[in-house]
Each structure stands twice: as C-alpha cells, then as structure tokens.
Image (cartoon, grey):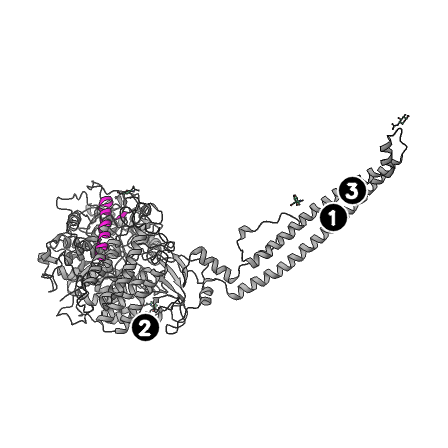
Amino acid sequence: MPRFRRYRVLLVCAFVITVLLYHVSKNSQWDRSTEIWHAKPAPPATNHNTRPPAHQQPDSNTPPPPPAPKHRDDDTAPAPHAPPHPPPPEPRLDEPTTINIPQLKTADGVKGLYGLPTPATGGSDGYDAADPDALKPTQPATVPGIRPPNTHDDYQKQNDHVGIQIADEPTSTTIHWQKPKEWFPVPEESLIMLPTGAPKPIPLVQFAFGQESPAAKEKRELRLAKVKAEAQRAWSGYKKYAWTHDELMPVSNRSKDPFCGWAATLVDSLDTLWIMGLKDEFDDAVEAVKDIDFTTTPYRDDIPVFETIIRYLGGLVGAYDVTGGKAGGYHVLLDKAVELAEILMSVFDTPNRLPILYYSWKPAYNINPKRASPSAGVAELGSMSVEFTRLAQLTGKQKYYDAVARITNAFEELQNRPNATAIPGIFPENLDATGCNHTAPRPQTLEDSSEAAQSQAAANDDLWRAPGGYQGSNSESSSVGQIVQPGDGSGFNRGPQKRSPPNTAPAPFTAKGLPADWECVPQGLTPGGYGGGSYSMGGSQDSTYEYFPKQYLMLGGLEPKYRTMHEKTVDAAREHLLYRPMAKGDPDILFSAKAYSTDGTLAKMTYEWEVTHLTCFLGGMFGLGGKIFNRPGDVEIGKKLADGCVWAYDSMPAGVMPESSRVVPCKSADDCHFDQAAWYKALDHLSLEEREKRMDDYYTSLAKWKKEVKELEEEEASQKQAEAQKRQEEARRRAAEEEERRKRPVNSSLPGQEATAGQQRPASVAELKQQDTVQKRDLGDSNASQSNTQKLQDILDFNSNGHDDDSDQKPMKDVSLPPAPEKPLTHQEFVERRIKNERIPSGFVTLNDKRYILRPEAIESVWYMYRITGDVSWQEKGWRMFEAVVRATRTEVAHGAYRDVTLAPPAGAAGDEASAKRDGVEDSMESFWLAETLKYFYLLFAEPDVISLDEWVLNTEAHPFRRPK
Ligand SMILES: *[C@@H]1O[C@H](CO)[C@@H](O)[C@H](O)[C@H]1NC(C)=O
Ligand SMILES: *[C@@H]1O[C@H](CO)[C@@H](O)[C@H](O)[C@H]1NC(C)=O
Ligand SMILES: *[C@@H]1O[C@H](CO)[C@@H](O)[C@H](O)[C@H]1NC(C)=O
Ligand SMILES: *[C@@H]1O[C@H](CO)[C@@H](O)[C@H](O)[C@H]1NC(C)=O
C-alpha cells in the first residue's frame, strides 16, 4: 500500500513536471532573451558623468550623436515587462532565500553578516604600509589621480529624492544584503595572484624641484590658504546641512542621496581633509564612517558598482593609506572598505567572471545566477582595478585582485583580437560582456547544462565555507516569492520589485539549480549594445584607459601587460582621435575627438570635434604614462592637451569651461591658422551654396512681388482717377444746376444780393468747395498708396540696413497686397546672429551643455603638468581657473554647479549675499568637488612632496593609494 501510494505520487509529479516543462519551454527562451540579449533602449540624453551626451544644437551641421548610453546593466533583474520570470532557482541547501530580519545596528556600527578580516591579520605582500612615512596631517603625500566618474549625472538626476531621511535605526522591515552562495566561484587554485617580487625600477614622474624664493613661497602659500578656506567652507556647509547624506544641496541647504545614502561626500572627502591638515574634521568624519551600513539602502534597488567603487571603496582605502595604513590607527577605514568590498564581490559571480554593473542587492534577487550586461559601459567595466588591487595588497586577499585581473585579461584579449574594434587599440563605448555568442546556435542540452552546473555547484559548495563565511538560513523556496518589496518612493523603480510574482511555472533547472537555458557558446568581450560604434577618450571610456598606467604603478611594474595596453591606447588616440582646433591666436593645443564607425571598421568614420570637460583628464594620463614609460613625446602631447582645457576655460566669459562643446579642427596640427571664414562656415548648418540659392530665390520672388504690387497700384490709381473724374463731373453737374436755379426770377431782391447773383459768385464758391473735397479725397487715397509704397520701401531698406529682426516688420495692412517675401538671412547674418544669441566664444561651434558642474579633470591635468615639468606657469593657469570657478559657483553655504559659463557671474560678487541669491548656480554639489577638484587645486599649491607622484597613485576619484616600494 505505501508502495502504491508512492508510485501514485511519482506519477502525479511526472505529469506536473511535464506540463511545467512544456510551459517553460514556451516561455523561458523568450524570457531570457529579452533579459539578456537586447540592449535596453538608451534613455534620453542627460547622463553619465558618464557623462552627458551632447545635446545636439539644431544649428549644428554634424549628425546628432546617438542618445546617451544608459549606464545601467542588466543584472539579474529581468526587464519589468518581461514575461513570467523564471522562478527562483530550486531551493538548495542553505540557500539564503529570506530577508534578513532586523540586523540591528550594534553599538560599534553594523558589521554585516560576515566576519571582517582584521587588517592586523590580513598580512600583505610586503607592500603593506607599516608606514614610517605615513602621511601626517601636516605633511601629506600622494599620487596622481584621474578623471571624474562618468555616470554621475544620470544617477544624480534619477535620484534627487530630496528630503528623504534614512531612518536612524533599521526597523523590522529593513531589508539587508546577505552574502549569496556563489554560482560561479573561482576555485582557490585558479585564483589569479598578485605578482610577486621586488618592484621594478620606474622612471621618476616628478620634476626635481629646487628651492623656491621667499617671494614665490609667500605667494604660493597665500593661494594654498585660499584653497583650503574654500574647502573648509564647502565642508562646513555639508556638515551643517547634509551630514551623513550623499550630497549637500548648496542653494536650498538640503541634502540628497543619489549614491545609496552612504554619505558619499563624507567618505569621498576623507583624504582631502587629511591632506589639508583638517584633523578635527577628519576625526569627526571617521566617527560617522563607523555608522555607515553598506548592507542596506532605502534609496536604490541596485547599487551602481562603478560609482560605489571609485567613491566609497576608493575613498576608504585612500583615507586608510594617507593616514599611514596600519600604523595610522584608523583601522575602521579598512574594515569598512572590506565590508563594502565583500558586498561588491558578488557582482563578479557570473559565468565569465565579468561583473554586473548595477547590482540588485536585495536577497530575493541576489540569490539568482547573474550574467554581465550585453551593453556594459567601458569605463564602468574597466575602472575597478586599482581599488581592488590596493585592497588585495592591504588585506592579502587574492580574490580581490583576481576579480579585476580577469577584467583586464578580457580587455587585453579584445585589444589584441584582430579587427575586433573599428579603431585597433581602443574600445567602443559599450561592450557585450555576457560572454555569450548569441549569433552562434545554442548548443545546450539539459544534460550538458546539468554536468557543467554540477561541477560549478560542487566547487561552489566549498566556497564560503570558511569561518566567517556566509551562514545562510534554511528556508522554503516559496518564501522568496512572498517577499514584499517596499516601494522606495524615489521613483527609482528599476529593479527587483517589478518582477513577476513567484510560483509561476518553474523553469527547468539543472541538477544544481541553474536555469536549463543558461549555457551558451562562449566569447570574449565584443562591441555591443548601444554605442558599439562610438570611440572617444571621454565620458564612458575614460577611466579604463586612465587605469592602465596607474595599475602598472600599483603593481610595481611587475605586470607588463598594463604598459602594453597603455601604449596601444595612446598610439590609437594619437593617430585617430587627437586634433588641434582652429582658434584665434593659433594656440598650440590639442583635444580628443569622438569617432563613430558606421560599419565597425575604420573605413567609414565620422567625427565629432568635441571639447568636453570629462576628457580633460587626458593631459594627465599622457603626462604620467609618458614619464613612467619613458615616452617624452607623450609628455609633450599631455601639455598640449592640458593647455587645450586651459584655453577652453579662458575662452568663456565666466572663465570656466563648459561641460560639453564643439570646435573646428585644423586640417593639420602643424599648419594651423585661425580663419574666420572657416569658423563662420562651421557655424552655419547650411552650405554657402544653399545660402546663395536662398538669396537668389528671394530676389526672384521679390521682383515678382514688386511687379504685382506695382500692377495693383496702377490699377488702384486708375480706379481712383476714374472716381475722381466721376466726382468732378458730379460737381460740375451740381454746379450747373445751381446755376440754373440762380437764373430763375427773383421775387424781391436786395440790391447787393442782386448784384452778386448776377455775377454768379455763389456758384463759383460752391464749385471750389466741391473741388476741395475731391482733392482731399484724392490726397487720402494717395496717402494709402503712399504708405504701401513706404512699406515696400521699408522692406527694401531692411535688406541694406541689415535690420533683420522679423518682429520689426510691420504687416501690410492693405489686404489687397500679397505679403512680401521674407528675406532669408545671409550666411554672415545667420552666423552673427547665432554668435550673439548663443553667446558663442571665438573658435567654438556649439555649446551643447553650458554648465560647469564642479568637475576636476582640467585642474587635474594642470596639476600633473606642474608636478611633471616644474613649470610655475601651470600654477598661474591653475590660479586663474580657481578664481573663476569660485567666483562662479560660490553659494552662501558652499559651492554649486554653475548654470551657464557663457555668462560672467556678477563682478566681484564671489560669495557675497548678492551672488548667493543669484539664480546662476544650481542646487548641486557633487562629492567630487571636495574629493577631487579642491584637492587638485590644493595640491597644485602645496609642497611638491605632498602626495608625490613618485609615491602615490590617485584613483579616478583622486583618492591616493600608496605605491609599492
Ligand atoms: C542657507 O543657509 C544660509 C546660512 O546658513 C542662509 O543665509 C540661507 O538663507 C539659507 N538658504 C535657504 C534657502 O534656506
Ligand atoms: C559568434 O559565432 C559566430 C557563428 O559561430 C561566429 O561567426 C562569430 O565569429 C562569433 N563571434 C565571436 C565574437 O566569437
Ligand atoms: C414770389 O412772389 C410771389 C408774389 O410776390 C409769391 O407768390 C411767391 O411765393 C414768391 N416766390 C418765392 C419763391 O418767394
Ligand atoms: C493721410 O495723411 C494724413 C496726414 O498724415 C492723415 O492725417 C490722414 O489720416 C491720412 N489719410 C489716410 C486715408 O490714411
């Protein structure tokens, strides 16, 4: 009996499974393909620090650039519209399927679920700063830093949920991140290890500075103090109005939290405070760091991986390093860095170990297998290396290095694969990082999947078994689906809460729980997704290139591939992207263009001659690489690139460069002369031929119109004449009648009357009167025709006057006349009007984005050039920039983005009441203002051994990491 029952159960199960399999086979493929293969449509341009794609000017003559790439990956979260989502994988032993109920903060801050490696036991590879020469607040030191984050703006915009406060204490509904079991772990023996050995000798980066004169010192120190004062001011504003929030809103005195609300500005500013000697402020901030809970955020369902790494992880590691590392006594900084890194490590848990870039951290989604995006931003993918490398060095944990080394290897393979990218040596804006060749037929069978999955899962089981590893709660798989995701109220509703409810048909799973259709034909990184044909050194690519030489330094020169990759990059940029703009005075400067390949090859390239603030990091990169790899030509290029950005600052009425603009390239960098005609030509979206044709057409129709008008006038005139004649005849007739009357006998007459009547005097007067009336009427009529004539004349005069404002043209009142043809603008009129209306400075063609959002790249390169060349003219350039920036951005409590650099800020108003109230400043102060911009200004006027480039590497958020010795 029991036996029979068992069979019956099996039969029922078999039936159910068959039905479900059928269901799933219908759904799952489509489902997954929606999720994985189709790049999401790009959002409207605004973005990414990744920078905001240029807004096309209607007048420009270049094709509009593609919309801004969306810096958003698919990670595990299916598109909201996806059909029934594959249900959560089969329950597995110790699967962490539930929310972690009340992870209450402990007195010493939230530690998350894993044991933190303590720095003391971490051990290091000899790099560890036991730090005799740790930076002291009074005498800081560091290395080169680089560009600003790309994707800042997008997130900023999407996440302005002003005024939301994080609850001080998690409530029982607070969801916390939990470490998921790994699906695709790297076996211990396969970990890519940090290179070992004594660091290679690397040529010095910094100029051999000598003694400075007392006068020079005084001037420098005065400037240094002014920079520091501005930084203190911004910090005080943050502290007073936005403490522990991500950003201060410097106009409204409020705060916002675009980066998960983990106090981005606070963490980002730590090392700046230390370097500037603001020890009390630093200590306050470190206290606050202890309370940051990286395991939860009410603001986002996904963690923006790139921004989180460069700002938070970089900020914590940099602060730990500048305070002297282990010896400095701020262990909490490294503890928090590790805490965050442990959360972020899950993003690498993909079949090809390439990371997802937007991490759906909530346990309900986090437990699912992940695959990297089919449209991953190059900058986001490639800008993790120095942070994780330094962390590996500080903790001795090779897995951090392994994670980023695999990304480098993928980039290296792509760079070396023939014809893989249109411009050999560099990468397009977005790459397919899934590791799946979706043009190849899918080979998978359930058996294959099962086998592969089994071995993966077997390896998986061993991982995280280590003490302090994840302790998952055993729970029913069904509970996954019952998790209720609270709305976050931010309008940020990408992500997990949109998933379809669980308990729909389960997909078939392989033995160890992977979806059956997970297998695919492997491939490396390939151009893909939106922007797969777009090449530049700007926004969405920048810091990947920036990190090649920096990572070489971090590894003490022991990993030669970074040198090779850097050299291929700069050679490609030199050959295909760098150009000299045509500018008044023929300055010897360079910028880097954006190139589009329409067919994936070099054959059909179009260029956008862009001048963007983000690309300004390039001077520093060429300078640094030129020094350490002994390529003096690159240093010279670096100078010209840095000078390009200085020129752009100097060109604007505000003295500050715009976010994005375009100029005219010279035909040749060696033979480059400003040519007003060529500049004007570039300002006109129409060709001269088209302008001439429009003029010809105008004159033709004008002549026709004049003829018509004349005919009408003649007609009118003859009509009038006929009328006048008629009236005259009438008058004459009436006069005759009068005459007649007068001639009749008079009954009795006075003598005088009789005499008059006899001479016909009265008749004569009447006639005169009548004639007068007629004349008056004639005059009136001629008034009318005269005014028409006058109008015509006006219109004709208007041509010669250059008086071309349409609004001044008076409409013709006489409806009988056809409207005069509108005079088209001549080329010159058009161009001059544009220059005036759009306030276009000499040499520029469009200003796509006139804001200055407190970005650091230009001063960053100026600082590199100063440290590399020792030429004090760079300090002068930097000081000009500083004064202009402060004048434009100062608010009552801090500094804010400046709205339009083509408008000079009110003179002499920097920081006073009037300037604070003017509306030219936006209510935004990104964390990079204190982390980077003010730091670079400060370092430009600090002693050259403060953060010496021969001892430090600065990450792309300007956080200094100590180089191995
Ligand atoms: C912001 O704070 C400053 C000084 O604390 C104050 O003068 C200003 O009026 C405040 N602005 C707003 C919008 O409240
Ligand atoms: C993908 O597969 C197709 C067909 O097998 C092949 O032609 C193509 O080269 C592959 N692409 C990559 C990037 O490997
Ligand atoms: C002319 O005089 C006669 C007689 O004196 C009188 O009847 C008649 O009305 C007068 N006519 C006029 C127009 O005064
Ligand atoms: C003719 O011109 C006179 C004087 O300017 C003006 O007063 C009069 O109104 C005009 N008549 C017509 C019909 O426009």
Q: Is residue 401 magenta?
A: no
Pointer 2 residue Cβ closer than 8 Å to ligand 2: no
Q: Nearer the viewer, residue 539 or 285?
A: 285
Whether residue 419 is visible to the viewer of this picture, yes or no, is: yes
Q: Describe the element under mark 3 as helix, strand or loop.
A: helix
Whether residue 741 is visible to the viewer of this picture, yes or no, is: no
Image location (x, y in percent) of residue 9: 24, 47
Toward the front, the furthest residue is 751
Real-space CA distance between mark 3 and mark 2, rounded to the nearest whole angstrom: 103 Å
Q: Nearer the viewer, residue 473 or 195?
A: 195
Examine the rendered structure and indicate whether residue 928 appears above or below residue 644.
above
Q: Amino acid at mark 2?
A: Pro
Pointer 1 residue Cβ closer than 8 Å to ligand 4: no
Comparing labels 1 and 2, the label whose residue is closer to the camera: 1
- Mark 1 is surrounded, within 10 Å at the Cα level, by few (under 14), some (14 to 19) or many (20 or more) other residues, namely some
Nearer-N-terminus badge (1/2):
2
Q: For residue 304, which quarter of the picture? A: bottom left
Q: Which residue is mark 1?
A: 720
Classify residue 122 as left or right of residue 455.
Answer: left
Residue drawn 44% across and 63% down?
62
Report the magenta stretch's main SS.
helix
Real-space CA distance between mark 1 and mark 3, rounded to the nearest whole angstrom: 20 Å
Disc sitting over residue 503 in the figure = none
Q: Magenta stretch?
A: 223-252
Q: Which residue is mark 3?
A: 768
Examine the rendered structure and indicate whether residue 226 appears above or below residue 764.
below
Comparing labels 3 and 2, the label whose residue is closer to the camera: 3
